[in-house]
Amino acid sequence: MKTKSGIYLIPDREMLSESEELRKEYNASYEYNDFFLASVLDDRRLQEEMIEAYAKVKSDFSSDTIHGAFLDVTLHSSDPLIREVSEKRVIQSMEIAKRMGVRGVVFHTNRIYGLREPAYLTNWKSTNERFFRKLAEQYPKQEILIENMFDEAPDVLLELAESLSDVPNIGVCLDYAHAAVYGEKPETWLELLAPHIRHLHLNDNDLKEDLHLPAGTGRIDWACFEQMRKRYHVEASALVEVKGVARQREELEFMRRNGIYL
C-alpha cells in the first residue's frame, strides 16, 4: 500500500502540529519510532497514551508503518533464553501494529557484521525463515519488512527474501545508508534486491558512520541511487529517515530539487 507520494516521515510527538503540516504538504504517511524500546513494549498504558496522542491528529493509521524491536534482538541465537526474549519482543511489536492497524512493521536482520562462517549463515537464514513465515501467518494484515543493518553484502538477505517470496506479506526494507556504510557499492543492493523491496529508508552519511544526515548533506551519490532505482523499477515507499521537522524538510527539498524519488 502506497500513499500518492510514497513518502514516509517520522512524526515528532512533541511537535505534532508541525509534523502534520509537513505530512499533509507531501501527502505522506508516518513511520512511528516510539514503540521499539523495552520500556514501551512492556508498558501497555504508555503504549495507549502514545497511540492516543497520534490519534488526535491522525484518525487513520492504515498506510503507516512502525519500527519494530531491534535492540539486542537475536532471533537466530543458539541460546534458547535469548531467542525466547527476542521472539517475545518481535511479537510485542506486531501486537502494537495490529492494535493500530498499520500497514507494516520494520525489523532488522541483526547479523554479526562480516561473519561469513557457513554454519552461522545457514542457521541465520533457516531460523529467520521459519520464524517470519509463522509470524506472517499470525498477522496476515500487516507486512513484515526485513531491513539490512550490519550486512556487508546483499546476498544473505537476498537468499532469505527469495525463500520467503511465496509469503505475500513479507518483503525487504532497503536502508540505502546502511548499505553505503557497511557494504560496498550500495547501488548493487538495489539491483539484486529490487524484486523484493517494498520500503526504503533514505538518509545520508560520510560513508564511514551511520549518521542519519538529511540527504544531500553527506557523501552518498543520490543521482546514482535514482538512476538505479528507475532502472530496476523499484517503486517502494520511502521513509525520510531523519528526525526533526526542519531536517526532514531539508531532505525533502533536496529530493524535490534534484528529482530524487519525488
Image (cartoon, helix red, strand yellow):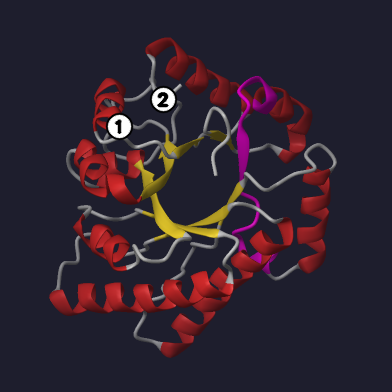
Front-most of residues 164 and 253: 164
Residue type (three-letter) at the residue carrying disc 1: Arg
Q: How crowded is mark 1: few (under 14 residues within 10 Å), some or many (20 or more)?
A: some
Q: Which numbered disc, 1 or 2, marks the residue that appears first in the sequence?
A: 1
Task: Say if residue 112 shows up in the picture.
Answer: no
Residue 85 seen in the figure: yes
Examine the image and state in which quarter residue 105 appears. bottom right
- Residue 76 position within the rendered picture, expressed as x and y whole percent measured from the top left: 36, 77
Q: Quadrant of residue 11?
A: top right
Q: Residue 229 carries which label?
A: 1
* Spatial separation of the CA atoms under disc 1 and disc 2: 8 Å
Horizontal side, residue 37 vs residue 99: left or right: left
The residue lying at 62 percent from left, 44 percent from top is 63
Image quadrant for the N terminus?
top right
Q: What residue type is labelled 2?
A: Tyr
Placement of 76 over or under 192, stated as above or below = below
Name of the residue lying farthest toward the top: 257
Disc 1 to disc 2: CB gap under 8 Å: yes
Q: Name the residue under label 2.
A: 261
Where disc 1 sits, the SS reads: helix
> Horizontal placement of 144 versus 225: left or right?
right
- Is 169 inside the magenta-drawn segment? no
Residue visible at 66% across and 28% down? 23
Give the magenta range. 23-41
- Residue 221, percent from left and from top: 26, 24
Identify whether 43 is placed above or below 17. Answer: below
Q: Please state the horizontal and vertical placement of residue 103, each as a whole percent of the image.
A: 60, 52
Q: Which of 194 and 251 is in front in this view?
A: 194
**Residue 43 x %, y %:** 75, 68
Query: Between residues 55 and 251, which one lies in front from this camera angle?
Result: 55
Q: In this view, does 98 lie to the left or right of 262?
A: right
